[in-house]
Image (spheres, rainbow, N blue to C red):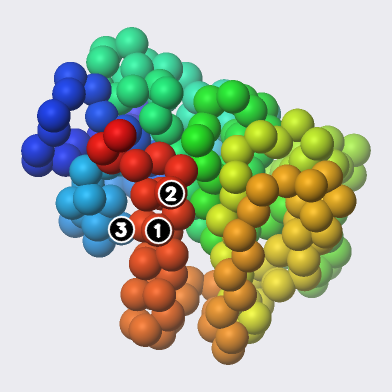
């Protein structure tokens, strides 16, 4: 398993607070190079952790295929193993962690926070998918077949869907979604919101009008990242 850590230029302690930034896909990958979101977080004093978990591309077909049927389990444990490795190496402080991501990264942020409910100070999920059967039903038949191969059959889809285990969640959530998202429709956020409310979980909801999956308008990206920094500063500040 491979990944990256970006450290802030100035630190006052041996270990620093960190944000685990999960890439989308999941059959995609993180690369070494300029990433504006990574640099934004690092410039504010956070270490940024990026894990190319099983299912990521560019590391061979066997590694990519190992993620099939494991969206909600082994992929998440790869991310948690990466975190524990960096904690053991004293790069990051295990008591000062948040996790965030968009699309599959948003799903993973919620799912990892359910699997390890005491690990994260906060969770940020944007444009995510939280009900896997709903995701499959939304697609055309040919695309749905591909998704079923990658996610698993209906029983696995349900078992790996965060909306069914929100009772286990402890971290406060910043949930963000665009109203015109045609890849992971707004309904995905709405079903998660319903569960967050039902279980009296701590959350902030931020809906962006007329925005799509990747937040294409620069003004919306600025507003979103301002919300992210405010949320991080509230729940996982760089200085105590």
Q: Which mark is residue 37?
A: 3
Q: Give coordinates of residue 136: x percent, y percent.
A: 80, 59
- Kindly check if marks 1 and 2 are in contact, taking CB atoms under 8 A apart as contact: yes
Residue 44, relative to residue 58: is it above or below? Answer: below
At x 79% / y 47%, what residue is drawn? 200
Dot 1: within a 10 Å radius of its alpha carbon, few (fewer than 14), some, or many (20 or more) residues? few
Asked if the residue under mark 2 is in contact with the one under mark 3, i.e. CB atoms within 8 Å, the reply is no
Q: Which mark is residue 230?
A: 1
Considering the image in quadrants, where does the N terminus appear? top left
Q: Give the residue drawn at x 25%, y 29%.
A: 16
The residue at 76%/56% (across/down) is 192
In-front residue for pair 216/229: 229
Q: Label 2 belongs to which residue?
A: 234
Circle 2: is it few (<14), some (14-19), or many (20+) Cα within 10 Å?
Answer: few
* Residue 17 locus on image (x, y percent): 31, 33
Q: Is residue 187 left or right of residue 82?
A: right
């Amino acid at each position: 398993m491979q990944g990256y850590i970006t450290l802030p230029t100035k630190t006052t302690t041996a270990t620093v607070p960190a944000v685990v930034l999960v890439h989308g896909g999941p059959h995609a990958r993180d690369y070494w190079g300029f990433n504006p979101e990574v640099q934004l977080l690092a410039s504010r004093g956070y270490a940024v952790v990026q894990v190319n978990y099983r299912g990521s591309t560019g590391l061979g077909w066997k590694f990519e295929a190992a993620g099939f049927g494991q969206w909600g389990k082994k992929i998440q444990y790869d991310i948690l193993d990466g975190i524990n490795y960096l904690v053991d190496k004293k790069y990051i402080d295990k008591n000062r962690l948040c996790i965030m991501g968009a699309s599959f990264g948003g799903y993973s942020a919620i799912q990892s926070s359910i699997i390890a409910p005491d690990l994260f100070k906060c969770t940020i999920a944007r444009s995510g998918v939280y009900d896997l059967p709903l995701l499959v039903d939304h697609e055309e038949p040919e695309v749905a077949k591909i998704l079923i191969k990658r996610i698993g059959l209906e029983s696995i889809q349900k078992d790996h869907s965060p909306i069914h285990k929100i009772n286990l969640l402890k971290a406060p959530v910043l949930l963000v979604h665009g109203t015109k998202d045609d890849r992971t429709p707004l309904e995905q956020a709405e079903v998660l919101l319903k569960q967050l409310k039902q279980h009296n979980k701590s959350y902030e909801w931020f809906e962006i009008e007329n925005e799509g999956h990747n937040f294409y308008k620069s003004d919306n990206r600025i507003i979103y990242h301002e919300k992210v920094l405010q949320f991080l500063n509230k729940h996982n500040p760089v200085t105590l």
